[in-house]
Amino acid sequence: MTTPARRGRPRSENADVRILEEAHALLVERGYDRFAMDEVAVRAAVAKSTLYRRWPTKDHLLVALVAKIQDEVPVADTGDLRHDLSVYLTAIATGLDRMRRVGRDQTEQDRSAGVVAELVAAAARHPDVGDVVRNLFARRNALPLALLDRARERGALAPGTSSEVLFDQLAGALYYRLLVTGAPIGADYVEELVGQVLAGSGATPHSEGI
Amino acid sequence: MTTPARRGRPRSENADVRILEEAHALLVERGYDRFAMDEVAVRAAVAKSTLYRRWPTKDHLLVALVAKIQDEVPVADTGDLRHDLSVYLTAIATGLDRMRRVGRDQTEQDRSAGVVAELVAAAARHPDVGDVVRNLFARRNALPLALLDRARERGALAPGTSSEVLFDQLAGALYYRLLVTGAPIGADYVEELVGQVLAGSGATPHSEGI
Amino acid sequence: MTTPARRGRPRSENADVRILEEAHALLVERGYDRFAMDEVAVRAAVAKSTLYRRWPTKDHLLVALVAKIQDEVPVADTGDLRHDLSVYLTAIATGLDRMRRVGRDQTEQDRSAGVVAELVAAAARHPDVGDVVRNLFARRNALPLALLDRARERGALAPGTSSEVLFDQLAGALYYRLLVTGAPIGADYVEELVGQVLAGSGATPHSEGI
Amino acid sequence: MTTPARRGRPRSENADVRILEEAHALLVERGYDRFAMDEVAVRAAVAKSTLYRRWPTKDHLLVALVAKIQDEVPVADTGDLRHDLSVYLTAIATGLDRMRRVGRDQTEQDRSAGVVAELVAAAARHPDVGDVVRNLFARRNALPLALLDRARERGALAPGTSSEVLFDQLAGALYYRLLVTGAPIGADYVEELVGQVLAGSGATPHSEGI
DNA sequence: CGATAAGCGAGACGGTACGTCCAGTCTTCCA
DNA sequence: TGGAAGACTGGACGTACCGTCTCGCTTATCG
């Protein structure tokens, strides 16, 4: 089972790197809507056709970019479910908060969802971008989902509960605040959220480790 | 205290009506991004300046439009919290599902968030659009929030829980599925969600009415 | 019979002027193929859409430009047909020679037909551009054609000859040399040409004026 | 003096043939401006580099192609100059008319100069293409020029006339109509043209053979 | 009742990005 | 070295929309 022997000039990895670097810089500088393909091309010293050979659309490029940037959020399974979830969700919240500020006047203290909202819209515009986005989240959520499953196995979670629904409650609340209500998502909010969600799931509060 | 007696020709109500009608039709036909102000103007037989005199931006117009369309979702307080919430959330879910289909090929069975996603992005682009959107949701959520409060008062909900956080879990889960994961939001999902959220809030399962 | 009452904002004459001026300058600087619409727009401080509202194509703009530039070549009817034709054709030849040099390195001593050739090609590409070009020439040739007609009436030309065919021979020879063979078109060539064409048309050589 | 003994793989004659065939077909299908090198390459199953190894430019390829297609127009010297010229010019006119139709909707009854105009423009763009074109015409015109010379020698043409100028009048008229005025070039036009040109050149009308 | 103010339809305008197209060059591997 | 494949740079083209502006006209209220 070998590689099918590519013909023709291979794509320049160098170009890939430069494009993504400059695209990133530009996104941070300008934000989603004032991000221009022409400018990426110029700054990456690449022809526009090279851009469009790789990504059929500005939306595609940006989604790919964000997917790449997205930090791996690690999950530790210490046995203390409440703590582990708090840590994980706090990491997510921090990441979202960083995204919210991308490309806007740092001083303006707005409650905008910024890039995340645009990404969500991009996903809504092009079915294939949507697929990418969904894959991204699926991969990312696999770990915390497994965490919940293990917790249920060792009895820290009521048997009837669905990990997926539980996770929807948690992540959903964060995204809802970010995208819809604009309410702040601080560490204490995460704490309260996790507490309230676990309360009803058969978790012995604060004592599972014992 | 009367109206301060405007001078000059008053705005045409007729125009208002025609604009919103045609805008609606166009939004349904085309979806958010291929919705063009020029076309609204032509179809409503109205000058573009008339449009922009009323709404400073395409985003503003569309948000106003959606706000108007948005059905009043009534809340009944039967005393059966679980049931009341299920009804309310199902109504929301149905509405969202309708929005999801707006402006796209009816046959294509996609999982796109459509207009809602674009609205969220519009809110992210213009602070004042964001305010409108947030107000819209605040008004709409006031009722279910009050429902939760009353439930707590009569002891159907543990005293320590926050209605707002509770509601974030419920609505959040729906929007998260719509905007992010694209997972389906059926009646059974709502059922399960409400059950799981209430489980942790000191609600006596299925028996509060007794 | 009144003007049909224009509606909407009238086209800016100012823009027209600036565009044609800058287009002319640019054509002279660069020549036909390195003439760029984008640059005209920038230099005339005009939006590209303003360009394309007036001329649907680069070719259209340039043909219109040349039509405008084209000097009126006056025709004098002194009664000396040979002389009058020589003067007229020499003027044409000079004009063509000027066009030939447009947009190229002045030093390079080439035999290129330059802009004229491109115009001819443009006329071949778009039917409507062709119409403009043909009209241009029809108007321009009306005068010399009339000259020939009058000469025939006063007996200076054989009755059976066609003015049009005669003129084809004259103008044709010039364009043929310019566009096809690249042979030089000097004053003596014009002289010889006119002499030879008239010889066969019943013109009393050099003596009509007597 | 032998060929300097090429090293390496010899050029594929096969490729030559296929390229020119497909280029021809494509030219006929599309016309000059929508003729794309990429497509020739694909259709001839040949690399673009193979194209450019042979012709440095699209214009070069097309000029070469047309030069090759260009039918040899034979000249017969029957002694009847008027007849011989008519035959020759009619052949040219027919060829031009065929070219005019190349690459366009057959139904559209246009008066476009088509490929010929583009060739002329190509010649204007690249000096060396111009050389090729001029050579092409020089070779082609050598025969009729000789015809005129012989006619003068045997007294059928006035001694003072220049064959070259005479030929400019004839060919020029045709090209002028084709490229500039768009007037039709039928058999009767050729007839009239030749008649009028010869009338003034000392040719005994219709009686030289006697 | 005429002056003043604003709304309106029409449509041009500046601005700006998008995505497309194609010419001509370069790189890789294969014959 | 030639050839096939196909990526690359470069750069213009024409399109699409947004939000603004300029006309000439209409419809109100105010003095």
Image: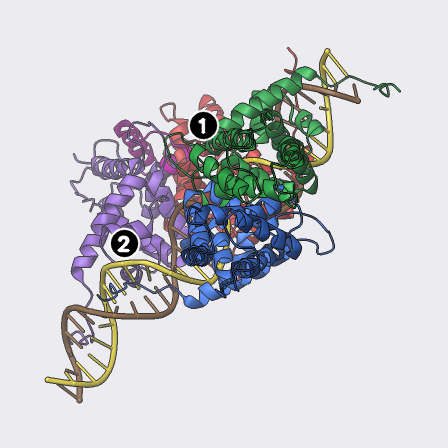
Chain colours: A red, B purple, C blue, D green, E yellow, F brown
Q: Magenta segment range?
A: B177-201
Q: CA distance from mark 2 to mark 1?
A: 60 Å
Q: Secondary structure at mark 1?
A: loop
- Image position, residue C168 (x, y; %): 50, 46
- Image position, residue E16 (x, y; %): 50, 55
Q: Is residue F29 above or below residue C127?
A: below
Residue B179 is at least partly visible in this image? yes
The residue lying furthest to the right in this view is D1
Whether labels 2 and 1 share one chain: no
Tell whether position B186 is magenta: yes
**Image quarter in which the N terminus of chain A is found:** top right
Residue A93 is at least partly visible in this image? no
Q: Residue drawn 40% across and 66% down?
A: C12
Residue C10 occupies quadrant: bottom left
Q: Residue drawn 50% across and 27% down?
A: D28
- Image position, residue C68 (x, y; %): 48, 60
Q: Which mark is residue B41?
A: 2
- Image position, residue A183 (x, y; %): 40, 52
Amino acid carrying label 1: it is Ala
Query: Which of B206 and C89 lies nearest the eye of the viewer?
Result: C89
Report which residue position mark 1 lands on.
A156
